[in-house]
Amino acid sequence: MGRDGIAGLVVLVVSVVLFGLTFRIQSNPLVPVSPAFYPRLVLGATAVLSALMVAIDLVKRRRAGPTPAPAKAAAAKPRYDMVVILFAIFAVYVLVLPYLGFRIGTAAFLAVMQYAMARPRSLRAWIVLALVALVATAATHAMFETYLQVLLPRGRWTDF
Amino acid sequence: MFELLGGALIHILQVKYLLPLFLGTLAGVIGGALPGVTITMTIIVALPFTFGLDPLQGLAAMAGLYVGGSAGGLVTAVLLGIPGTPSTVATTFDGYPMGRKEPGRALWLGIWGSFFGGMLGGVFLIFTTKPLAEFALAFGPWEYFSLFVLALSMVAGLVEASLVKALVSGFIGLIVTVLGNDPMLGGPRLTLGIPFLEGGIPFLPVLIGVFAFAQIMSEVEKSGGAGSMAPPVANAGSLKVSQLKVIWEILSRPFLLIWSAIIGVWIGVLPAIGGSAANIMAYDQAKKFSKHPEKFGTGIPEGIIASEAGNNANVGGSLVTIMAFGIPGDAVTAVMLGAMTIHGIQSGPLFIQQHPDIAYGIFAAYIVAHPIMVLILGLGARFAMRIMTIPKSTLFPIVLVLCVIGAFALDNSMDTVYVLLAFGVIGYLMVKAGFPLAPFILGAILGDQIEINLIRSIMTDPNPMLFITRPISGGLLLASVASVVFSLWQHRRTQRRMAAAAAAPSDEDIADF
């Protein structure tokens, strides 16, 4: 099964599971149309379309026959490892933000992200990294809290 | 109308509104000039800055950002040969060859082309929004439902991916809206045991997460996050040029300018196609109508004027759709729609009647943004080139922090930030799976309205034939079927052409012998 087939299958499973859950939605006797009506319509149509996606993929692959192993491309390999690392750093940032607070959490996040994306190789680069983390945090905090009256998260552990 | 517009122009020229408009335009120009940073991402980053402003200030900033962003991409397109945004791809075709010889002329042809194209788009915006909104007032729930179905089917049909995949993407967007909340009665449904979902999923963090992460992670994939957005420029040459001469070069080609603007506006009105198609189609049309099409691509003014007039007129068209029908023309107007909702303004046919001050304020901001854009690009082109050398490792983390602030500030809750993270992952996976994002976003935005209008129509009269027998509703549904059939036909034609092209080289080889 190709990329489209797998993607279609995932959507199909999710829509079928959610479709099943619509039977737990309670109807309101005062309203003639159940709150489950529209979700069932949407989820049913999604299931049909995603099944069609899987079928098209299977038919295409069968018609094309066995595909030869792709030649190694000269282009640079996608850095999926870096994508996973950055998602993980962001997830940790989001999860610790309520505990550390915006200022500490964001300064740490900016420093770690910069380090992960381009490791500093000189003292100057380290100083730039630290300055970017501190100045960007201070500037966004001042701008939003002071001038735009947007309250940013306070840390439960740090109260800062 | 002219009285209201005049009043709005005077209003918008006050420092209170002019400053956010200027800053929005500046941010748009910078974001547009940065290759790899789209207007959508720029507007997402700028969104939290508008929360503390009054509605017109915030929307003026966004209008400026949209105008600035649409034009900003031409700086790199002309001087580096790298389109700053996808909507300046065609500008590079003639802009860069001319920019290597006469950088000042190429840049200013682009700037003034954007200006005149944008102003023509503004004429359309001002004169058609009200009549279209009045026409939409005659709509009942059947017509609205059919209109939203048309919007979704058009988007699904017009994106490059396969029709089925685009439709699945649109339906995934609709699924987002069925989770958690019944918009008719306000009761919980399909909450998956998550208390936060009882209020439904707010669409702005969905939009921010999907677009910001899809773009940033795609860039990270390429280089691991190292390097800058564009190579440093040694010397862009002299940018000085006779302004009158450049303006005359444009105005002496009125058909080219007007036709490019019409194409831009028309593409802007159609949901979710965007400036890139306007830019390329206007260029393509200019080439087809030209007496010397063979010169296109060598650095001729027509190529720059058409492409830039097209993509800036597109902005006017997109704004018409959101202001008259409440349907976002593209991702940028989708964010604007979200910003309106945050400020308690419901866009749609009643918007111009209920909030004429804001509607005409947006028109005025759109008009005033154009001379500001000319000023910023004229004075700051060299500065913008320097900003492009900011490393991605500095830029992207700051963008993500601004996304977090934008999501958090929606209701001062971390829950919306978790939604941002979840849809960041989902958006990235969707891109990797080849799902187009435009139908997904439109589905997520229109889902509630589709449900409300469908249920209202059934509750008013359960006869389903009314969707077909009511003339406007039937016409709209017919148009959506036509749109799907057209896209199927177009897809088949493209496949046939590709197959023919694959066979063509061997024929040419034979001919060469």
Image: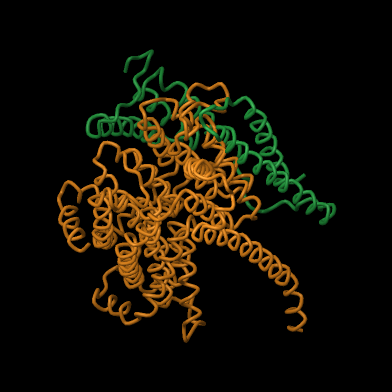
Chain colours: A green, B orange
Q: Position of residue A115 (x, y in %)?
A: 47, 32
Which residue is most to the bottom?
B291
Name the image quarter holding residue A36: top right
Instruction: Name the residue nearer the viewer: B488 or A114.
Output: B488
Name the image quarter holding residue A103: top left
Does B341 appear above or below B37? above
Q: Is residue B225 visible?
A: no
Q: Please state if B503 lies on the left or on the right of B478 as rendered.
A: right
Q: Please state if B459 lies on the left or on the right of B371 as rendered.
A: right
Residue at 38% x, 14% y is: A156
Q: Is residue B106 visible?
A: yes
Residue at 34% x, 60% y is: B129
Instruction: Name the residue nearer the viewer: B255 or B42.
Output: B255
Instruction: Name the residue nearer the viewer: B29 or A127.
Output: B29
Q: Position of residue B304 (x, y in %)?
A: 40, 72
Which residue is most to the top?
A157
Q: Please state if A16 lies on the left or on the right of B297 as rendered.
A: right
Does B160 appear above or below B59? below
Does A109 appear above or below B204? above
Quadrant into which the C terminus of chain B falls: bottom right
Name the image quarter holding residue B313: bottom left
Does B282 appear above or below A110? below
Q: Position of residue B464 (x, y in %)?
A: 59, 49
Count of numbered tags:
0
Q: Please state if A53 lies on the left or on the right of B456 as rendered.
A: right
Instruction: Name the residue nearer the viewer: A149 or A136.
Output: A149
Quadrant into which the N terminus of chain B falls: bottom left
Q: Position of residue B168 (x, y in %)?
A: 62, 46
